[in-house]
């Protein structure tokens, strides 16, 4: 149900991000999605804790199958009294060993509960693994998206700076006011301010990704990947159907088995166990020996474990409601991610089919006309800003799309099958 190569598959399906190259600083290595996921799995304390839970459950299972220990008893009667019982001359000494025997399948019920506990912990470990993969993929996308936004703003700053020589010539020729030079500088400064804001966002995203990979601070350079490879998602109904395979829901089957075994054990507890003892008794007064046999059975008159039985019944009945509540939560999370994903696709369609091409065309025409004196600097800067904003919106939509994919993959437990489209 859950493939062992989930890390590699999620890396590919989360955004087709493995392809694509980015130049890395000389002092640090470029990070890919595959490497980030592998490192997160290797260092995640949550995953380590989940693995320890499996060990804890295994220990409890071993203990559940342990037999009751025998008891060794020494007794001395009729000694250290008065008269004929002075000292130990008339003492009766008994050495006895006893063993309690559990009946009616109590030990088997404990073992069944322990086995189910191991299964619950193992399935929960799978759920944590998917969460770590999904969170790491989303953090990686945040870094990649912030990098791309900074590149777009750098390109806008360069475009404004390229206007400076032309602007100076126009001022010298008297075709433009000297105030336009200041206007260009202000426009460049505002874009630089936006770039600094995105740099702060990038720093936070890098730190979050580093922590998920087990580092207190980023030890990687840039991240490498592509956001422009996309596809059409399946229907939401198919996503909801696939959610039932999520380990968070699968584990409820094991929890039901565990609670059912606990109920059986609670019902069996009032049934009495038998304790058998065999011993040897020595009579000092006559120097004779005799065997001693004992059988004891408790009488369940006052305590029939009714309270624990009721508690176990309610706990078992509660399981179905808890599973449904868990499933509803997962569906809500998947729905938000799916709606975000679909909304991003529609937004991208508008941006790519209309906004970006038309804004670019208008910007090119206005820039060319500015050199011919047909447009003002304000119109040039406004056109450039429109292109930049449209491209920033495109990057945001791409990031939201792939983050939605990663979120849903973490819920369904399998790669998100997309009908791929060619990258634009």
Image (spheres, helix red, strand yellow):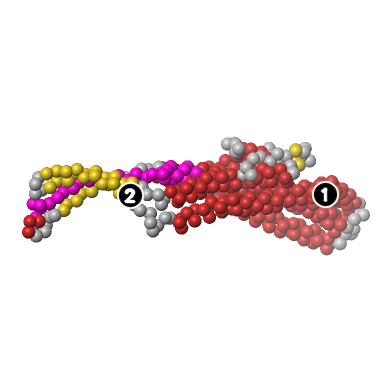
Work out whether residue 255 or residue 49 is closer to the camera in this orientation and state it: 255
Secondary structure of the residue carrying numbered label 1: helix
| Residue sitting at x 74%, y 42% | 234
- Spot occupied by residue 224 in the image (x, y as percentages of width and height): 66, 42
Q: Is residue 198 visible?
A: yes
- Spot occupied by residue 372 in the image (x, y as percentages of width and height): 91, 51
The range drawn in magenta is 87-116
Quarter assignment of residue 241 = top right
Secondary structure of the residue carrying numbered label 2: loop
The residue where tag 1 is placed is: 350
- Spot occupied by residue 422 in the image (x, y as percentages of width and height): 77, 37
Q: CA distance from mark 2 to mark 1?
A: 82 Å
Q: Which mark is residue 5?
A: none
Q: Is residue 96 magenta?
A: yes
What is the number of callouts on the image? 2
| Left or right of residue 318, residue 280 in this image | left
Q: Earlier in the sequence, mark 2 or mark 1?
A: 2
- Spot occupied by residue 298 in the image (x, y as percentages of width and height): 34, 52
Q: Is residue 43 visible?
A: no
Work out whether residue 20 or residue 262 is closer to the camera in this orientation and state it: 262
Q: Quadrant of the N terminus?
A: top right
Q: Quadrant of the C terminus?
A: top right
| Residue sitting at x 70%, y 39% | 417
Q: Label 2: few (<14), some or many (≥20) within 10 Å?
A: few
Work out whether residue 92 or residue 326 is closer to the camera in this orientation and state it: 92
The residue where tag 2 is placed is: 297
Residue that protrudes farthest toward the left in the picture:
83
| Left or right of residue 327, residue 263 in this image | left
Q: Is residue 108 magenta?
A: yes
| Left or right of residue 303, residue 183 in this image | right
């Amino acid at each position: 149900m859950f493939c062992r190569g989930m890390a590699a598959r999620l890396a590919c399906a989360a955004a087709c991000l493995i392809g694509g190259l980015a130049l890395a600083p000389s002092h640090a290595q470029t990070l890919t999605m595959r490497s980030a996921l592998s490192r997160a799995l290797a260092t995640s304390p949550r995953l380590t804790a989940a693995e320890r839970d499996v060990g804890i459950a295994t220990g409890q299972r071993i203990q559940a199958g342990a037999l009751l220990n025998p008891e060794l008893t020494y007794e001395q009667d009729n000694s250290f009294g008065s008269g004929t019982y002075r000292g130990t001359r008339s003492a009766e000494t008994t050495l006895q060993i006893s063993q309690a025997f559990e009946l009616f399948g109590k030990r088997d019920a404990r073992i069944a509960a322990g086995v189910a506990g191991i299964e619950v912990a193992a399935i929960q470990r799978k759920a944590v693994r998917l969460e770590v993969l999904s969170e790491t993929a989303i953090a990686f996308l945040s870094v990649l998206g912030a990098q791309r936004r900074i590149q777009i703003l750098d390109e806008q700053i360069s475009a404004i700076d390229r206007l400076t020589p032309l602007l100076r010539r126009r001022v010298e020729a008297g075709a433009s006011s000297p105030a336009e030079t200041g206007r260009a500088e202000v426009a460049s400064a505002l874009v630089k301010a936006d770039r600094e804001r995105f740099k702060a966002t990038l720093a936070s995203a890098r730190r979050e990704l580093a922590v998920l990979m087990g580092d207190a601070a980023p030890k990687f350079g840039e991240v490498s990947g592509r956001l422009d490879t996309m596809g059409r998602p399946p229907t939401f109904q198919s996503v909801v159907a696939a959610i039932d395979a999520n380990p968070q829901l699968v584990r409820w089957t094991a929890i039901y088995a565990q609670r059912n075994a606990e109920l059986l054990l609670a019902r069996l507890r009032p049934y009495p166990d038998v304790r058998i003892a065999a011993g040897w008794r020595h009579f000092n007064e006559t120097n004779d020996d005799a065997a001693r046999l004992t059988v004891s059975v408790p009488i369940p008159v006052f305590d029939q474990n009714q309270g624990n039985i009721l508690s176990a019944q309610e706990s078992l009945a509660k399981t179905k409601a808890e599973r449904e509540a868990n499933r509803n939560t997962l569906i809500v999370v998947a729905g938000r991610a799916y709606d975000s994903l679909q909304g991003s696709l529609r937004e991208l369609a508008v941006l790519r089919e209309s906004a970006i091409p038309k804004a670019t065309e208008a910007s090119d025409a206005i820039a060319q006309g500015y050199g011919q004196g047909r447009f003002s600097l304000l119109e040039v800067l406004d056109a450039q800003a429109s292109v930049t904003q449209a491209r920033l919106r495109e990057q945001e939509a791409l990031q939201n799309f792939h983050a939605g994919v990663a979120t849903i993959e973490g819920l369904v437990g399998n790669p998100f099958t997309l009908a791929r489209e060619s990258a634009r």
